[in-house]
Image (cartoon, rainbow, N blue to C red):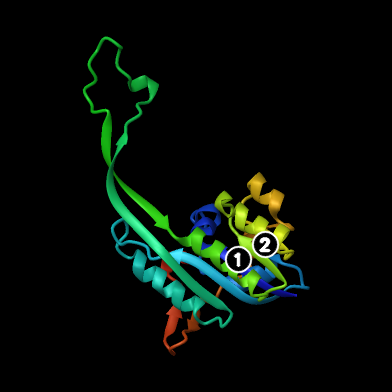
């Protein structure tokens, strides 16, 4: 079965990879093959992410580019970038009960604080648009979505129930969002063992002939 896989990069990162840096050097096509059935021929993997900012971590953009270069070595993988926005905003301040003053006292702190807010924009819209368009063009027999984002419920429902093409959920969490689970044609859970089995080699040759090295802090501890 021709199978397209749509990967919500940030959702996968925050659900499984943030706490497992030694598993971030991830071959997402191999991961898809590890989780899916042997009947699925993974003919395309679409990865949705955004350019990270150096504002919070100076080396982050360079590390991300190394990973994107590694993904570019896989012919079936395409990368689709949204936007990563960083802005300063005011937010209401909530004090823990033990620090709240007596109601007769005047609080010595403001009711709001200025925060640095980071937001990823566009990935879910891009993923949903491509899923619908590829289904309309009959480019796959089966699709699978790697995410736990409930914003994707409606596009999955439309493709599965209205267009008659099964869309499965490759869940990065133990208990998937019930709304996603309800519309998916099947659900498979991504386990740490799947990630371990789908790592790039520590050194691989990039598409342009350069050698790509797994970032040092993405290596397994000795």
Give whichever of 221, 49 is nearer the camera.
Answer: 49
Instruction: Look at the picture and state if 13 lies above or below 142.
Output: above
Could you tell which of marks 1 and 2 lies nearer the N-terminus?
1
**Label 2 SS:** helix
| Residue located farthest toward the right when viewing the structure as drawn | 39
Give whichever of 121, 19 is nearer the camera.
Answer: 121
Q: Is residue 191 visible?
A: no
Give whichever of 221, 175 is nearer the camera.
Answer: 175
**114 relative position to 180: left or right:** left
Q: Residue at x 27, y 32 (%)?
A: 112
Give how far across and how far down residue 147 sits, in percent: 58, 57
Give how far across and how far down residue 2 sits, in percent: 71, 76
Numbered tag placed on residue 132 in the rendering: 1
Q: Residue at x 71, y 64 (%)?
A: 163
Quadrant assignment, res 138:
bottom right
Residue under pointer 2: 159
**110 relative position to 129: left or right:** left
Instruction: Look at the picture and state if 159 lies above or below 134.
Output: above
Distance between the alpha carbons at the discs numbered 1 and 2: 6 Å
Give how far across and how far down residue 87 sits, in percent: 29, 51
Q: Residue at x 53, y 69 (%)?
A: 47
Quadrant assignment, res 82:
bottom left
Mark 1 neighbour density, 10 Å: few (under 14) some (14–19) many (20 or more) = some
**Label 1 SS:** helix
């Amino acid at each position: 079965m021709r199978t397209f896989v749509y990967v919500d990069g940030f959702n996968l990162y925050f659900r499984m990879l943030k706490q497992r840096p030694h598993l971030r050097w991830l071959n997402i096509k191999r991961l898809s093959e590890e989780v899916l059935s042997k009947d699925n021929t993974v003919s395309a993997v679409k990865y949705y992410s955004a350019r990270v900012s150096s504002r919070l971590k100076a080396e982050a953009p360079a590390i991300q580019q190394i990973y994107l270069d590694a993904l570019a070595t896989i012919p079936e993988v395409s990368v689709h970038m949204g936007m990563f926005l960083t802005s300063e905003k005011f937010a209401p301040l909530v004090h823990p009960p033990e620090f709240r003053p007596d109601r007769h006292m005047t609080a010595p702190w403001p009711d709001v604080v200025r925060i640095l807010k980071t937001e990823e924009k566009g990935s879910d819209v891009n993923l949903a648009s491509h899923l619908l368009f590829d289904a309309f063009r009959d480019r796959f027999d089966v699709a699978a979505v790697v995410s736990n984002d409930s914003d994707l419920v409606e596009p999955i429902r439309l493709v599965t129930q209205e267009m008659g093409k099964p869309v499965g959920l490759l869940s990065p969490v133990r208990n998937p969002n019930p709304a996603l689970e309800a519309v998916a044609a099947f659900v498979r859970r991504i386990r740490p063992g799947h990630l371990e089995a789908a790592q790039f080699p520590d050194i691989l040759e990039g598409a342009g002939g350069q050698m790509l090295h797994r970032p040092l802090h993405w290596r397994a501890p000795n």
